[in-house]
Amino acid sequence: MIGDPFRDVPPYARNVWDMQRFGGRIYLSQGDEIDNRGPAEIWTLDPASGRLQRDFVTDEEQVESFRVLDGELYAPGFDPRSGWSLGTFYRLERTGWERHRTIPRALHTFDLAWHAGTLFAATGGRGRAGEPTLLASADRGRTWLPVSEQTQRIYTLFELGGALYAAPKLRTDGDTSRALLRYDGARFRATGVTGATLLPGLPDTAGRVLRPVAFRDALVYVVAAGAINWKPAGLAVARSLDDVRALPFPDPRAAPYDLLVRGDTLFALTSTPVDSGYVVRVYATERLNGWRERVRFRSPAFARSFEEAGGDFFIGLGCTYQDPSPASGLILRVRRNR
C-alpha cells in the first residue's frame, strides 16, 4: 500500500475515479457527486518514490476523469459548485492547473475531446430547449458554439474509424430517442444506433459507454449500467458500428473497471466478488483473441482505476454508494518481476 490520500472524506467520496500518467507523474481524482461533497481534490503520485501529494483543489463536487488532448492534460468539470450559468473544465498549464468557467449553461461537463483541431465538450444541463449539450471551441475553450440541438445529457465522446461520436445514456430496448450521435464536420446527427447494439451483455436497462480506448483499429470500452455511481457489466469491442461484440474474460464473473494501452498491449483492470472482498486481476491481450493474467491479489474493496509506470501497476480502490468500504481510496502498487 502506498497511501490513503482521501482518508478525511466518507468512503464513496474516496473513490479513485481515474488515474492518469502525464509528465512523469500520475494524477488521481476523487469526489462525490451524489451527496455533493466537495471541493474535490487532484493529487499526484511520483512513481519513482511513491510519494503522494495534493496538487490542486478544484471547485467541483467530483472529478471523474482526466483527458490528454493535443498533448495537454484536462479534467472535465464533472459537478461544479458554482452557479449553473457556466460549465467548467480544468487544464494543466505552465503555472499549474487553471479553471476555465466558459461553457454556456453546462451544469455538468462529462467529457472533452479533441478532433480536427477543435475542442469538444459533452455536457448535461436541465434538459431545456435552447440549452444544447454538445459544444465546440476553436480557441481552446475560450468561446463555445453549439454543434447539436440535443438537450439530453451526453456522457462520452470517442473516435471510431476517424469519426467523432457522442453517447448519451443508452437504452437496450431500442429507444432511438437516445441514440448514438455522429459529428459530420458541422453538427452531430443521430445514427439510430442504440444500446441494443453498443451495450452487449447489459440487461434490459440503460447504461454508458465508459473508458473508451483505441486499440488495433478498434474501440474497446467498458459497458456499464447506470450513469452516476455506474456498475460495470462487461467489456465490448467495436470495429465499426456494424461490428460490435462482447469481449469476455477467462473468469466470467470478472467486472472490468478500467483500461490501459501500452504499445501493442491492452490491459484490463477487473474485480471479482468473493467472500470477504474481491479478487483483483489485471489481464493483458495483444490481439483481442485471448487474455493473459498479469496480476492477481485479494482486496477488501474492488479496484476502480489503474496506471502503469516502469512496469509497475498503480491501483486505486473504490466502492459503490450503496455499499461503502473503509478500503475505498487506498492506493496500491504492484511491482513487476525484476
Image: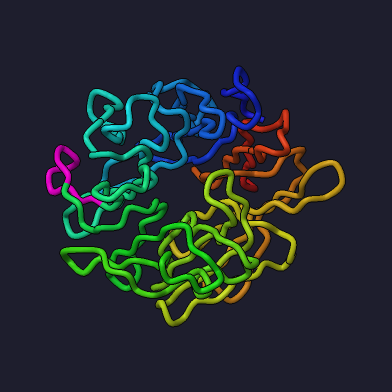
Answer with left or right where residue 62 lies relative to residue 203.
Answer: left
Left or right: where does residue 328 sit relative to residue 128?
A: right
The picture quadrant where one finds residue 74 is: top left
What residue appears at the point 24 percent right and 23 percent down from the top-left corner?
95
Seen in the picture, residue 135 relative to 202 is either above or below; the reply is above
> Residue 245: x, y in percent?
55, 76
Q: In x, y percent, where is residue 39?
A: 45, 22
Q: Is residue 142 magenta?
A: yes
Up-down relation of residue 86 to residue 302 (above or below) = above
In percent of the image, x 27 and y 46: which residue is there?
A: 131
Residue at point 27%, 68% (across, down)? 189
Q: x, y percentage for residue 196? A: 53, 73
Q: What range of the chain is rendered magenta?
A: 135-144
Residue in front for this viewpoint, 252 or 295 = 252
**Above/below status of 50 relative to 254:** above
Observer-nearest of 4 and 78: 78
Of 215 and 62, nearer the camera is 62
Specify the quadrant of the image occupied by residue 203. bottom right
Q: Tell me which residue sits at (50%, 57%) in the image.
A: 208
Dominant secondary-structure state across the stretch colored magenta: loop
Quadrant (top left/top right/bottom left/bottom right) for the N terminus? top right
Left or right of residue 207: residue 299: right
Residue 286 in sight in this render? no
